[in-house]
Image: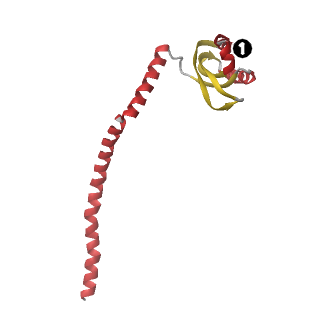
């Protein structure tokens, strides 16, 4: 059995009636194909970027489950046939993360977003750019010194031709 992460986008109007029904529906879909649900959580009700089957809103459920690789196609087929599931994304994992790992990972994302907003990475990249600029100056100094010498030789040749 392989570990998987599944993101289910479910029909919004059913959720207004009963969230437990939707969670049970997702569990039944996975059980039907021979998988076992390890963890299922409701994420959020969100507006979709574009309409799916005429729907502008959906409820997102994150599910960690184990199943054989051959049954993922069956799960996708069952979700297409279900009137409640708008979209499904399934990813194979190395292992199912613990609750702490999921929290820690979401904390890292928040820290990265804060750093990007504060400009901390920009300061470090500027110092890297200065180092590159110094290297370029060193390289440009060498050709610049040899370039006038090369230019003076043709001028000297032209001057010797005109004086003869």
Q: Residues within 10 Å of mark 1 (few under 14, many from 20)?
A: some
- Which is nearer the eye, 23 or 136? 23
Q: Is residue 1 visible?
A: no
- Which is nearer the eye, 62 or 74? 62
Residue at image point 38% right, 31% down: 115
Q: Is residue 144 left or right of residue 30?
A: left
Up-down relation of residue 15 to residue 164 (above or below): above
Q: Is residue 58 left or right of residue 144?
A: right
Q: Position of residue 14 (x, y in %)?
A: 69, 17
In which quadrant of the rendered view does residue 54 lie?
top right
Q: Position of residue 74 (x, y in %)?
A: 72, 22
Q: Is residue 149 visible?
A: yes
Q: Is residue 136 left or right of residue 14?
A: left
In the rendered image, the residue lying farthest to the bottom is 164
In which quadrant of the rendered view does residue 84 lie?
top right
Up-down relation of residue 86 to residue 97 (above or below): below
Residue at image point 27% right, 64% down: 146
- Which is nearer the eye, 34 or 40? 40
In which quadrant of the rendered view does residue 80 lie?
top right
Up-down relation of residue 40 to residue 57 (above or below): above
Q: Is residue 120 left or right of residue 68?
A: left
Residue at image point 30% right, 46% down: 130
> Which image quadrant: the C terminus?
bottom left
Residue at image point 51% right, 17% down: 97
Residue at label 1?
A: 32
Q: Secondary structure at mark 1?
A: helix
Q: Position of residue 139 (x, y in %)?
A: 29, 55
Up-down relation of residue 75 to residue 133 (above or below): above
> Which image quadrant: the N terminus?
top right
Q: Position of residue 33 (x, y in %)?
A: 71, 16
Q: How is the image coloured?
A: secondary structure
């Amino acid at each position: 059995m392989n570990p998987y992460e599944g993101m289910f986008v479910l029909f919004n109007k059913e959720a207004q009636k009963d969230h437990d029904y939707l969670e049970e529906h997702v569990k039944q879909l996975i059980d039907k194909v021979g998988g076992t649900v390890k963890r299922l959580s409701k994420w959020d009700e969100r507006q979709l970027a574009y309409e799916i089957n005429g729907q502008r809103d959906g409820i997102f459920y994150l599910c960690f489950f184990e199943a054989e690789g051959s049954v993922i196609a069956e799960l996708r087929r069952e979700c297409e046939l279900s009137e409640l599931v708008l979209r499904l994304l399934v990813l194979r994992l190395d292992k199912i993360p613990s609750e702490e790992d999921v929290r820690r990972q979401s904390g890292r994302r928040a820290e990265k977003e804060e750093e990007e907003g504060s400009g901390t990475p920009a300061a470090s990249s500027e110092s890297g750019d200065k180092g590159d600029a110094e290297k370029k100056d060193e390289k440009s100094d060498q050709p610049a010194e040899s370039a006038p010498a090369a230019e003076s030789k043709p001028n000297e040749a032209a001057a010797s031709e005109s004086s003869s």
